[in-house]
Structure formats: C-alpha cells, structure tokens
Amino acid sequence: MSRSLRWQSGVYAVVLAASALLAACSGGNTRVQEGNATGVLHYGNGAEPQAIDPHLTSGVPEAHIIDSLFEGLVSKDPETLEPVPGVAERWEVSPDGLTYRFHLRADARWSDGTALTAEDFHWSWWRGLQPALGNDSAYMMFPLKNAEAYLKGEITDFDQVGVRVIDPRTLEVELGAPTPYFLQLVAHASYYPVPRHVIEKFGAPADRFTRWTRVGNIVSNGAYRLAEWKLNRYVRVERNPEYWDAANVRLNAVMFYVTENIVTEERLFRSGQLHYTTDIPLDKIPVYRREAPELLRQDLYLSTYFYMLNVTRPGLDDARVRRALAMSVDRQTLVDTVLQGVNVPAYAMTPPGTLGYQPPTLFDFDPEAARKLLAEAGYPDGKGLPPLEVVYNTHEGHRKIAVAIQQMWKKHLNIDVTIVNQEWKVFLDTRQHGEFSISRHGWQGDYVDPNTFLDLFITGGGNNNGKWSNARYDELILRKLPAARTQEERFAIFHEAETILMEEMPVIPLYTYVTKHLVSPTVKGMAPNILDFYSFKHIYVEPAK
Amino acid sequence: MLRFFWLRLLQAIPVLLVVITFTFFLVRFAPGGPFDQERVQVPEVRRALEAQYRMDQPLLAQYGSYLGDLLRGDLGPSFKYPGRSVNELIAAGFPATAELGTYALLIAIVVGMGAGLIAALHPNTWRDYLPMSLAMIGICAPTFLLGPLLVLVFGIWLEWLPVSGWGDLPGDKILPSLTLGFAYAAYIARLSRGGMLEVLSQDYIRTARAKGLPERVVIFKHALRGGLVPVVAYLGPAFAMLLSGSFVVETVFQVPGLGRFFVQAAFNRDYTMILGCTTFLAFLIIVFNLLSDVLAAWLNPRVRGAIGGRA
C-alpha cells in the first residue's frame, strides 16, 4: 500500500512539473504581434498550393502566391480593380479596339537582375498556349487573335497569333474581336511573364515535371520573391529588391500558411497566430457579429450559387415547370436561416453591380403564381410530375440548402424531390455527363464582366451541362456582343440575353456568394472588392496602438 | 530464427503485389478522374494532360509501366501537384507522421501500461475501476472530439500551448501527440491489465511469492515479461497504424504529415499518390508485424521453440 502511495505521489509530481513547463512555454509575443513589429503578414491561405507556375494552376490559394511573385503588363487597382500600370508603364488601344500597344518600363527586371523585355512576354504567352503543357487557364488567352486555333492545333505557326515584339520595350497585341475586358485579362496570371532563361535551364518549356519553381531556382518579377516552401506548412515570400516599385512595397515578407481546416484556422486567428483567415466556419459568424464585429469582414463576391436543370428530362423540358420551381424557393428565408444571413439572394445569374451592369429581375418568391404555372404545364398540385432528384457534392452546407429547398417545393408545389449527395469527383462525373435532373452548381467570375457568367449557356458550351439551347441567346452572345461598340450597347445585349435566360430558366439562381474573413485590425491597405483580390504590394501592418 | 525472418520477408512480396494490383485497378474504376474539375478543360488541353501522365495508353500497359517504374523505386509523378514526385511527397510527409507516431506510441506505452499495471495489481478496487473507465472512454472518444477539447482547454482557455502547428512554435507538438497517444493508451491499458491478471494467477507466480520473493521482484521480474505479450503483439500493428498517419489528428492540428496527403489523394483521384502511399504503408505494416512477431517470440519461449530458433 505504501508503495502504491509513493507511485501516486510520483505521478502527481510529474504532472505538476509538466504543467509548470507548459506554463513556461506560453507568454511572450504572438506571431501577429511579432509580424506587426517586423513587417511580416501571417496569412491563412487555405489548401496546399498545387504549383506556383502561373501556367500550371488555376486555384485560388495558388493565385494569391503567384500574384505576390509575378506581375503582368497591367495590374489591378486594389480598390476599384481598374487596370493600372504594371510592367507596362502605358499602353494605347486602337480605335477599333483590336490592337493594344504596351510600352514596358525601362527598369523592369527579373528578381535575379536580368532585364525583363517584350520578348519575355512573347515567349511566355507562347508557352501558355503549348497544348502539351496542359494549361487549365489557356482559354483566358483566347481573345488573342488565333490563340484558340493555335492551342487546338489548327494552326502551327505562332507568328499568326496576335502578339508581336516591336522592340525590347514594346509589345503589340492583336485581338480576334473587340474585348472590352481585355486589360483585366492581361492582369490575370495566365498573362504573367515566366522566365525563359530559368525554365529552359531545368527542362523543356512544356514539361510539367521540372524543378524551376523550387526555392533557389525560381526567378520572378513581382513585388516579392520566393524564400521558403515547406510542404503542407507554409510558403514564405520576401520583398524583391529588384522590383521596379520596391520602394513602395511596405511588407518585408508574407507567410502563406496552409490552413485546410477552417475550424483550426479560426483558432489560430483567435490565438494571435494569423492576421487573416481565408474563411470562417458559418457557426462562428453570429459569435463574431456579437463580440468582435471589427474583426469580421464580409463582402459581395463575383460568384453565384445556383441549381442547374437538365432540360432534356421529362417535366423539366417545360419552361413553366422550371419557372415554377424557381419561384417557389424563398431565398430570403434560405439566406437568413440556413446561411446565417451571410449571402445575398439572387434572382439572376450575374451578381448585381458587375462593373455597373444591373441584371433584370423578372420574378420573385411567389408560390401562388408558381402553382398556377405548374398547373398550366399539366401538373396541377404537382400531380403527374415525373420524379425529380437534386444531386450535390458532399458538404454540410449544400445538404442544408438542399433539404430546405426540398421542403419548400413540397410545401408550395406539393412535389416530392429526392436529394442525393455524391463525393466531389463522382459528382463532377455525373454533372459532366448530364446524368442528373437538378444539380448544384457554383460559378465564380474570372473577370468583372457579365460575359464570364453568360457565355456559360451558349449551345454546346463545355459547362452547359443542362443542355439548354436558344438560338437568339447564342446570336446575342456570339455575334451581337463582339460587334457592340459601347459599354451601353454591350450591357443592353447582356440584359436581353439574361432576360431570355430567366424566362427560360435552365438554371435556378439561389444566392450571390459573400466572402468572409477574419482580419486583424493592424492590417492596412487591404481594401475589399468583388473579386476578393488583394494586392500584397499595397498591404502593410502596423503595431496596435 | 534467421530462416523464419527471411521466409516472412519473402512472403511479403506476393502480398505487396496483390495490394498494388488491387489498388491500381480499384482507383481506376472509381468514377471521376484526376483531371475532372469545376470548369471543363478545352478538349485539346485534356488530351495533352492525359498523354503527359500516360493515361492515353491502354490500362494494362499503364499497369505494366507502373510496375516497371516501381522496381526502380520510382512511384511516379503526382497528378495533383505538378512538378512533384510521389517519392518526394512521401519523403516530405513521412518524417512528421513518424515523429508524431513515435511520441504518441511512447505516451501510449507509458500511460497505458502504467494504468494497466495499477489496475491489475488492485483488481476490483477504485484503482482498477477509475483507470479502466477512463480507458473505456479513451477507446470510445474519437480523436476528433478529444483533439479540439484539449485545444480548447490548453490552447484557448489556459493559453499554455499552441492550438496547432508542428515545429513552428515551442510546445506545439504536445497536444497532437497527447491526442493520438491517448487513444492507443486506452487499448494498451486494457490489454496490459488483462495480460497481467492472467499471468498473476499462474502457478509460477504463486511459487515465486511462496519462495518469499519481494513483491517488486515478482511483478517486474517474473510477471511483467509474460503479462506484456498481448501488448507487444498489439504494438507492431499499432505502430504501423500510427505511421500511416492519423488523418484526423493531422488535420485538426495542421501537422504536415502523410495522413493528410493520403486522404487528399483519394479525394483528388491522384492515382499515383494513392498507389504510392498504399504501397509504402503496406510495406511498413508488413515490416512492423514481422518485428512484433520477432519480439513476441523473444518474450515467449514456447513460440521461440515453435519457429525452431535458439534464444
């Protein structure tokens, strides 16, 4: 007995000693406090970046890092998103909108000090259009004359593609059709220069498997250069002294942390280890609203959540049924309850205020009218309607929305809809093969223009999985739009096209996304915008007062 | 003994081959592929991508070339992370997983055996019931509950320890190791209690006590060796499981280990990464089972005799 007592007191001693040790570990400054003092931003960045070669990835976490490392001819104003000079100090556009002439600044350099010339852009765009490279974002370059034909192998002579080096500091670009948002595209990663002199040292230009983007190898031209890349932990970029505008870069470094789990990310923020989180768990939003609203940031995002209807399925082949389904969803209730009041109800595909464009509002929540439409289509009180099924990718949020809508359709239209979840890749397979009647969908705009949403629905479009087709719509988007001369004309065409879309209703828009972040009050120069785009060049941190 | 060892190693080859073959075809027949994504690619881009990863060849040819590469120790390029090989990703993730697994195992052994011993020495008293009830809770409580709970108490309320990370901040390895260790400690506690109780009722223990040996010698010299056989038998597979990475603990604490890569690979249909991880882990499990058998044989003279070795 006495021996076991000794054991026990020994155990207590160990526990006490361990607690003392633990207590000693705490205290001192948090990472955020240290970062404020040393000019280092601690940034929650979501998933592990797949790659930082601008031609090999199209993901969001990757884009943040790539945007800090590289710069295109044109940059985006961090607030208005208007094109501002980047590597090009100025440019001219021909009156027909088909030719752009970019004048590169004399002090543009790679991070190894090598001069950055028009030839670099020419070669980079050539690389981006090599079919063998498998560039996901190659379609962003299709406005360049003959770019699409070149990528598809219809022509093999790159000289026929609309990019020409006039002299080392002048690049001339020719478009296939006037593209008013072209300068926005030029500010996108797919138009960034990549260093030929480095890439060719490590392998063939179109080889996906080379080591040119590794720390120590990579050379970039943006405000920062790659300093460290710890797999599944973080990527560290440091101020690039060779950058032409280095004097105005205020951060010394940015730490991009891999934060796959948003619950953990929120805890990291709360314990002072992150300046910024990529997202917030939905159930934490009411807590922050109540207790620390100054840390919570929510902004409208150029992205729409919608249900896509397969118009070849019996029942859904009737526009009246599709409209009845759309009109019997109470979006406001959906947003207020299931979505914690975060998002904004949507009644059109294009988010409101996309560059000043206002989409038509043709319908509202109106169960009475919906029932009437359903009866007109031959399904009074839902009777006789072939069975419908909503398929969504496995996610708690999608499930809650599907359940809510299932109940609304039952209540207002008296129709029974089954809901099915599928693992992400299975879901993509189902959707791409059109094996659904109703499918969850979300679309994020590539650039701020209604076209990025509306060209989805042209006949035979790769992402038009619901197989909807309308001759007038195709004519508007494919023929009238490129011929439009002014922004008013273009918006009128978009308005007409979207009116057709919302009368025919091959999709049921549900809400416009809102981005949600936690941001430390010591972070400055991070203006909100509809693309959730942050210019790391303009961000700085200052110690809390 | 040595013959037994080599024989078991040879047996591992067909086992590995079956694992590889089965995994190879299973992942290929799962719907969806590595290049499926929200936005459909231009068909030409898609074809180029497939060609780069030899997916334009017939499936059997792909299988053949995969086996060929494997013989050279090349697990192939990752689909998800262009420019990275599966070998590199495993090499990057494994150290953290192995370190976490080792700490967790040490915690499991010390806590588990300690609790099991105390319980076995005082059967049917509170010193038995308390640790065994805790062990039962430990077995039942999933790591995704225990982990956040520990974080809440030690990370957020007491602010003693970092809430996540691995080697970034002092003390950030403690909570993940504890979380993972406790789950295994619970099993070990029950196993060592059972083993010890059985041994303590044996004749040779009664003899030892009758000889008038001090209790300390009876327990630690005579009983422990036999009583721990079930624990040792469990340690091999347990360590292999720990090394295969605990996806949950690695995710909750942002540990840059193999478990996260492995599970993500399955979601991403990163064919080569799934195969590489499976093969690597199958190999580890075979090796650790073998080691645990050898250790059990060394502890148990009867098994030692059966495999024809001399201790």
Image (spheres, coloured by chain):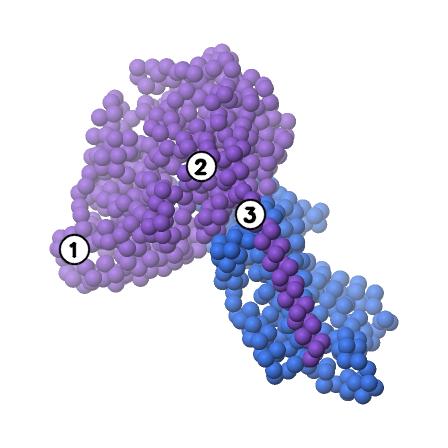
Chain colours: A purple, B blue
Q: Earlier in the sequence, mark 2 or mark 1?
A: 1
Viewport quadrant of the N terminus of chain A: bottom right
Kind of residue at badge 2: Ala
Residue closer to the observer: B203 or A427:
B203
- The answer to whether residue A377 is left or right of residue B114 is left
Residue B252 at x, y = what percent?
A: 52, 54
Which chain hosts label 1?
A
**Looking at the rendered structure, which numbered label has been put on residue A27?**
3
Residue A254: x %, y % from top left? 52, 34
**Residue flagged by tag 3: what amino acid is it?**
Gly
Say which mark, if any, is on residue A535.
none
A183 relative position to B240: left or right: left
Discs 3 and 1 carry the same chain letter:
yes
| Residue A146 shows in this picture | no
Which of pointers 2 and 1 indicates the residue nearer the eye?
A: 2
Local SS, label 2:
loop
Q: Which residue is mark 1?
A: A367
**Location of residue B125 with respect to B283 vertically, above or below:** below
